[in-house]
Amino acid sequence: MKRLLSVMMVLALFLPMISCGEPAQAIWSPPADATKAYTIECSVTGDRTTDAQGELLAEYRYEIPVMEAVDGAPDTVLEVAETFNAEMQALLDSCMTTGRQLGTWSREDPRVEGGSVYYSDRLTASWREQGSILCVTFQRYEDRLGPHPNVTYNAYLFDLDRACYVDPLELADDPEAFREAVAEQILEDLQKDADLQLGLYGDYADAVARWNEACVSLEGEALVVTFSAYTLAPHAAGPLSFRIPYEEAELGEGGLALLGLTK
């Protein structure tokens, strides 16, 4: 039960709001000297807490991508950027709820040794476009001096044509066929590791079936599903990642076209 609550709390922090309308027309026809309707840059928010001697007690550093419409882009592009940025800002605000308290917590924790043992909270971001989908992947590292740091992973998929965040299952023509095909391949990969098989939770297949709730990123020619530590097995201290080639994922012709994979 504790593990389930922990997973639910992580999902509540990371899962984007899913609200897509009908497919839209291209958001902008750029002039010949422009390649994109927008730019994306990394915004960093951070702070440090030190003791009277200037020794570090706590620090946080959060990265989020920020989309900005290029000069001359119409209002439709501005609206796309606003929609994208609003969810990224909500994620940053959630992180800052913790970040603002780290200094207080660290001063009250006798385990903190200024400069050598301190609280840390970091969110790093990377992103890439795959066809019409902008994929933003996050890794969060939290160290509050427990038995081990807490490292979680998640990804956001943003449909640039419809200007909304989507669940990974929405990439496919047949979401259920897509879910089953990816889950089957993950289960097959797990069965190849005899040692890991022995240590899996009894309900690990249920977690695999909900792989779309894990970190689903788009990388090159494959979909990559990453489960954070302890999601599938109590002794899997690190993340477990599975790479599924797009051609084997039952995306369908429409799904492949959405990801720019059809000729």
Image (cartoon, rainbow, N blue to C red):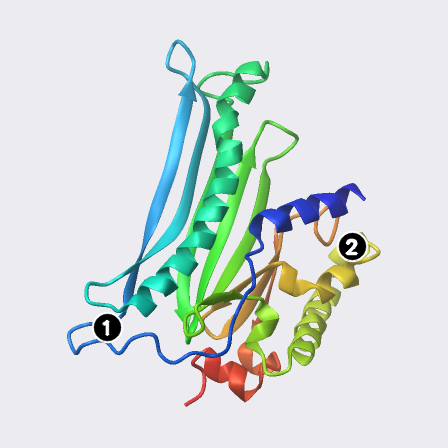
Q: Is residue 228 above or below residue 186?
A: above
Near mark 1 (Cα within 10 A), the count class, few <14, some 14-19 or many ≥20, is few
In which image quadrant can residue 55 be found? top left
Instruction: Name the quarter where the C terminus is drawn.
Output: bottom left
Q: Is residue 227 left or right of residue 79?
A: right
Q: Residue furthest top?
A: 52
Disc 1, SS: loop
Please state which of residues 78 and 239 is positioned toward the viewer in this rendering: 78
Q: Which mark is residue 200?
A: 2
Total tally of numbered discs in the picture: 2
Q: Which residue is mark 1?
A: 35
How far apart marks 2 and 1 lie (CA) works out to 48 Å
Q: Residue furthest left?
A: 33
| One can see residue 77 in this view | yes
- Who's the residue at 58% across and 66% down the image? 167
Q: Is residue 202 above or below residue 251?
A: above
- Who's the residue at 46% across and 44% down the image? 92
Q: Residue furthest bottom?
A: 263
Near mark 2 (Cα within 10 A), the count class, few <14, some 14-19 or many ≥20, is some
In which image quadrant can residue 108 be found? top right
Which amino acid type is shown beneath numbered disc 1? Thr
Image spot of residue 183 (x, y percent) = 70, 70
- Who's the residue at 19% across and 63% down the image? 71
Image spot of residue 59 (x, y percent) = 44, 29
Q: Does the CB distance between marks 2 and 1 fall below 8 Å?
A: no
Instruction: Name the quarter where the N terminus is drawn.
Output: top right
Please state which of residues 106 and 73 is positioned toward the viewer in this rendering: 73
Which amino acid type is shown beneath numbered disc 2? Leu
Q: Is residue 238 above or below residue 172?
A: above
- Who's the residue at 74% across and 51% down the image? 233
Q: Is residue 116 left or right of residue 78?
A: right
